[in-house]
Amino acid sequence: MALRPNLQPEQMLISVGDEAGKLNWAEIFGNDHPVELEIGSGKGTFLLAIATALPEHNYVGIEWAKAYADFAADRLRRHGTANARMVHGEATWWIRCHVPDASLTAIHVYFPDPWPKTRHHKRRLIQLPFLKEVHRMLVPGGKLRLVTDHAEYFAHMQETLAAQTDLQVVEFDSPVPLKADAPAGSIVGTNFERKYIAEGRKFHATAARKGEK
Ligand SMILES: C[S@@+](CC[C@H](N)C(=O)[O-])C[C@H]1O[C@@H](n2cnc3c(N)ncnc32)[C@H](O)[C@@H]1O
């Protein structure tokens, strides 16, 4: 079910078949500005905020739930956000098919599904093969940023980052100035963050950087 009537998401969606292969960001955005990716954009609140605040960067958001992907794309259209696009798709598959090597300056993953049951841990996004893809996609010096409210998933993220050597763990730094009305305790200003602040949850954040060589 659509989250809002009469959505017009099409012009803001990157919609390509697997056969399209790796994409050309400069063709998509009409410029060669740095490109950042958000995985699991939900309703697109972070994507819209960062794309508005930093117009000299381009943004791509991937969202698996069609209703959310369409809502976020329509929201970008309504705000005239020329430097952002949405993708409706499964992120691990889509990035492997379509994101060129060394083409992203940042990757944002905020409040990814924690899959708390042990038998579902394999569904978690943050796994070693995903971090290999992150390394492939980032430019030298590019950063992966992670935020979660789930302490056990955060421990898993830290263990997974410690088990690889491609990316160096670095302190989390804010990717975007927060809005004036952001509640106390905000880190990135997503919808889930706002909801979890109201519930009094604690957040965990980390980042990892691809070396310059
Ligand atoms: C807990 S929500 C967080 C949404 C948003 N980042 C926020 O903080 O408000 C996680 C989102 O990631 C999406 N998602 C989960 N796995 C995904 C995947 N493999 N590919 C794309 N989106 C995914 C879900 O559909 C959901 O909208």
Image (cartoon, helix red, strand yellow):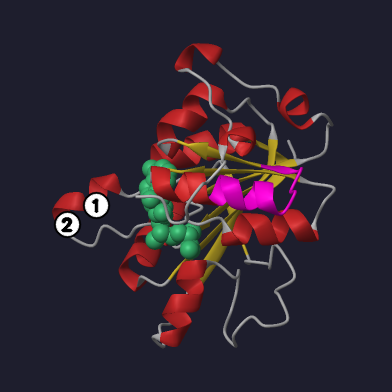
Question: Relative to the observer, which residue lies in front, 179 or 164?
Answer: 179
Question: Is residue 201 positioned above or below 51 on the image?
Answer: below
Q: Is mark 2 within 8 Å of ligand 1?
A: no
Is residue 110 among what the camera can see?
no
Q: Amino acid at mark 2?
A: Thr
Q: Residue at x 70, y 74 (%)?
A: 178
Question: Relative to the observer, which residue lies in front, 119 or 208?
Answer: 119
Residue 143: x and y in percent read 65, 50
Quarter of image, res 148: bottom left
Name the side, left or right, on which 48 lies relative to 61: right
Q: Is residue 111 inside the magenta stretch?
A: no
Question: Relative to the observer, which residue lies in front, 184 or 202?
Answer: 184
Alpha-carbon neighbours of circle 2 within 10 Å: few (<14), some, or many (≥20)? Answer: few
Q: Amino acid at mark 1?
A: His
Mark 2 residue element: helix
Q: Which residue is mark 1?
A: 121
Q: Residue at x 53, y 68 (%)?
A: 205
Name the side, left or right, on which 171 lies relative to 89: right
Residue furthest out toward the top: 19
Name the side, left or right, on which 175 lies relative to 149: right
Q: Residue at x 44, y 63 (%)?
A: 111
Q: CA distance from mark 1 to mark 2?
A: 5 Å
Magenta residues? 72-84
